[in-house]
């Protein structure tokens, strides 16, 4: 049988819309084939669509009922063999290039959603990224399978140690979300690796599977957001107009996946000058009323503003 030939390129647009709900980072998803979740996604038609962003906004609203605010382009994904094996079947195959976008909102669930849309917890797709519980560690499934994959290859073991801090002396870097997911994919530990090779599902694979290469796109978005926390005030794009410092810390922890030192975090917030008291108290804490704060905004002269420090618990 002759190998399949390329039949052009199909451009798709994917949106990672992230918010906070009940002190958890959540992402807007839609239903896909075979019961998995997908990011809002649609094809770009150069004959119909004027711009990528206009097409993105139209189909996100059509698929989910959500209207996008500010979006930024993440990355362009186009590796051969990634996504669905169906794309490579038949005498001709079509290469798919996906352009990912990131949007942040403080309003999860405030608009009418379509029946297929819902907000899913981000860390349900990447459970190994949640380091907030000091007594918790990587699941035994992830550790055991990484160790088996790397046991006879020192270079593999070094990569696993560097990314997952399996051995003493290695430090966890919360920003390397995509690299960790890619290593699990290469090691055949996540279900997408089996699916893309047209193999049976992996038993007890960690994290929820997503359609196409959407978990890869989501990993890129989470890593980008975690990095930006430290040099841009992006966390406030997820916050309501008024919030307590405890709520701000919980938001930082939900995104970073880290447990933060309370006093050091508050001192860092004070040093930045990013927040100001509103003169009001919150009674929603269940205990002593807490002071409410607001985001001051960026410098009106040059639009600059610092990020937040993330002092992890020791």
Image (cartoon, rainbow, N blue to C red):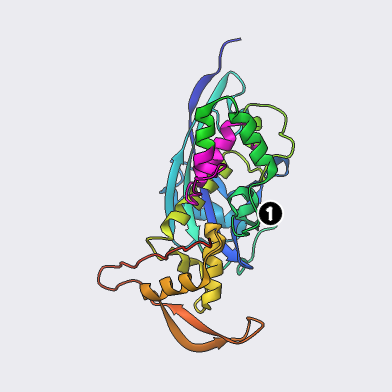
**Picture layout, residue 107 above or below residue 131:** below
Residue visible at 50% across and 22% down in the picture? 6
* Residue 264 horizontal/vertical position (percent): 46, 70
**Picture layout, residue 99 above or below residue 274:** above
Question: Where is residue 258, by image quadrant?
Answer: bottom right
User: Which sits in the foreground, 113 or 105?
Assistant: 105
Residue 39 visible to the viewer: yes
Question: Where is residue 204, by image quadrant?
Answer: top right
User: Which sits in the foreground, 280 or 86?
Assistant: 280
In the picture of the structure, the residue carrying the numbered disc 1 is 116
* Residue 162 horizontal/vertical position (percent): 49, 40
Label 1, residues with CA under 10 Å away: few <14, some 14-19, many ≥20: few
Residue 43 visible to the viewer: no
Magenta highlight on residue 253 = no
User: Which sits in the foreground, 246 or 199?
Assistant: 246
In the rendered image, the residue lying farthest to the right is: 203
In the rendered image, the residue lying farthest to the left is: 301
The quarter in which the N terminus is drawn is top right
Magenta highlight on residue 173 = yes
**Picture layout, residue 305 above or below residue 45:** below
Q: Is mark 1 on a helix, strand or loop?
A: loop
Q: What stretch is highlighted in magenta?
A: 161-190
* Residue 255 horizontal/vertical position (percent): 53, 59
Residue visible at 46% across and 69% down in the picture? 236
Question: Where is residue 227, by image quadrant?
Answer: bottom left
Residue visible at 63% across and 43% down in the picture? 210
């Amino acid at each position: 049988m002759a190998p399949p030939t390329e039949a052009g390129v199909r451009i798709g647009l994917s949106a990672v819309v992230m918010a906070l709900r009940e002190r958890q980072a959540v992402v807007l998803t839609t239903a896909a084939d075979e019961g998995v979740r997908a990011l809002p996604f649609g094809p770009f038609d150069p004959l119909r669509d004027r711009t990528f962003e206009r097409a993105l906004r139209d189909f996100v609203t059509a698929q989910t009922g959500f209207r996008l605010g500010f979006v930024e382009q993440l990355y362009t994904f186009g590796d051969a063999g990634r996504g669905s094996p169906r794309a490579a079947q038949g005498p001709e195959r079509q290469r798919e290039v996906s352009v990912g976008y990131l949007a942040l909102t403080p309003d999860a669930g405030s608009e009418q959603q379509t029946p297929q849309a819902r907000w899913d917890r981000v860390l349900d797709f990447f459970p190994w990224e949640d380091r907030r519980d000091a007594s918790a560690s990587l699941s035994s499934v992830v550790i055991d399978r990484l160790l088996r994959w790397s046991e006879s290859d020192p270079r593999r073991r070094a990569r696993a140690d560097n990314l997952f801090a399996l051995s003493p002396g290695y430090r966890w870097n919360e920003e390397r979300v995509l690299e960790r997911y890619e290593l699990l994919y290469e090691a055949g530990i996540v279900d997408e690796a089996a699916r893309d090779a047209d193999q049976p599902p992996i038993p007890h694979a960690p994290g929820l599977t997503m359609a196409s290469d959407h978990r890869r796109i989501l990993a890129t978005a989470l890593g980008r957001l975690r990095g930006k926390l430290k040099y841009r005030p992006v966390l406030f794009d997820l916050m309501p107009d008024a919030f307590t410092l405890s709520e701000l810390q919980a938001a930082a922890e939900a995104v970073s996946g880290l447990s933060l030192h309370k006093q050091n975090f508050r001192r860092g917030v004070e040093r930045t000058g990013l927040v100001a008291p509103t003169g009001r108290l919150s009674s929603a804490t269940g205990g002593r009323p807490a002071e409410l704060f607001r985001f001051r905004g960026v410098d009106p002269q040059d639009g600059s503003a610092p990020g937040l420090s993330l002092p992890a618990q020791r």
